[in-house]
Amino acid sequence: MKTASRSLLLLVVLCFHLFAFPSLQGAQLESIELSFSRATARAGEQVSLPIYLKSDDNIREAFQLTLRFSPSQLTYEALESGYLARKAGWVLSAELKKAPEGESQRELKITVQPGTSDFFPSGLIAQARFLVTDGVPDGDIVVHGSLERLSGANQTIQEVPTHIRVYSQLMYACFFYMH
């Protein structure tokens, strides 16, 4: 009887390692959906870019969000964690880097260390605050977002562009007056 129980226990432990353990190590990162809300500002003003993550899985693997933007249009100021991210015990840290050689872009690397909570904080994860450069013409400033794995070789899982709409003072005021 002892041999049968040991064999069964060994089989259960083996199955747990074969099937449950890999999903905790990163196979779930693909189940995260990265998105942004549209942001609007005038040249010379601050703007907050809301960053959203959505998943049905409770991710425990650290990962990185990267925002690429032109320093001639935007200046990075700060990163603010969202309420649910703080409640879940997530730690977000930001580092501004120059893009790879030969490119004039800046990269805001946001490292996300998930907490030990039993839920994924789907929704507003953070807000990146920028200053729109004086003299930027009306139109869209394109910000390229990506979600990357930190474990092993960095792998980009998703790339999502978003826009910050820049209006002149007159157009900005008319827009809100009419709506």
Image (tube, rainbow, N blue to C red):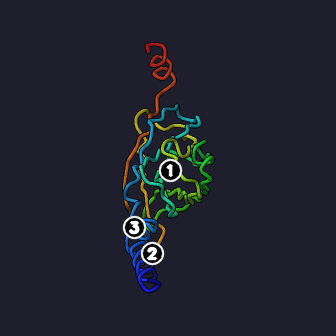
**How far is mark 3 from mark 1, CA to CA?**
21 Å
Q: Quadrant of residue 45?
A: top right
Image quadrant occupied by the N terminus: bottom left
State which mark lies toward you, 1 or 2.
Answer: 1
Q: Give the x, y percent position of residue 84.
A: 58, 44
Q: Is residue 7 left or right of residue 173?
A: left
Residue drawn at the location 60% of the way across and 47% of the way down: 81
Which of 40/145 is in front?
145
The residue closer to the viewer here, 16 or 36, is: 16
Q: Is residue 97 left or right of residue 54?
A: right
x and y percent of residue 64 in the render? 50, 60
- Residue for badge 2: 152
Q: Label 1's element?
A: loop
Q: Tags 2 and 3 in contact by the CB under 8 Å rule?
A: yes
Residue type at mark 3: give it. Gln
Checking the image for residue 120, the label placed there is 1
Residue 102 placement (x, y as % from top left): 42, 66
- Please tell me whether residue 27 is drawn above or below residue 179 in the rendered image: below
- Crowdedness near tag 1: few (<14), some (14–19) or many (≥20) residues, C-alpha within 10 Å: many
Q: How dense is the environment of label 3, judged by Cα within 10 Å: few (below 14), some, or many (20 and up)?
A: few
The numbered mark, 3 or 1, whose residue comes first in the sequence reads: 1
> Does 46 sit above or below residue 77?
above
Q: Which of label 3 and label 1 is nearer to you?
A: 1
Q: Residue at x 38, y 63 (%)?
A: 156
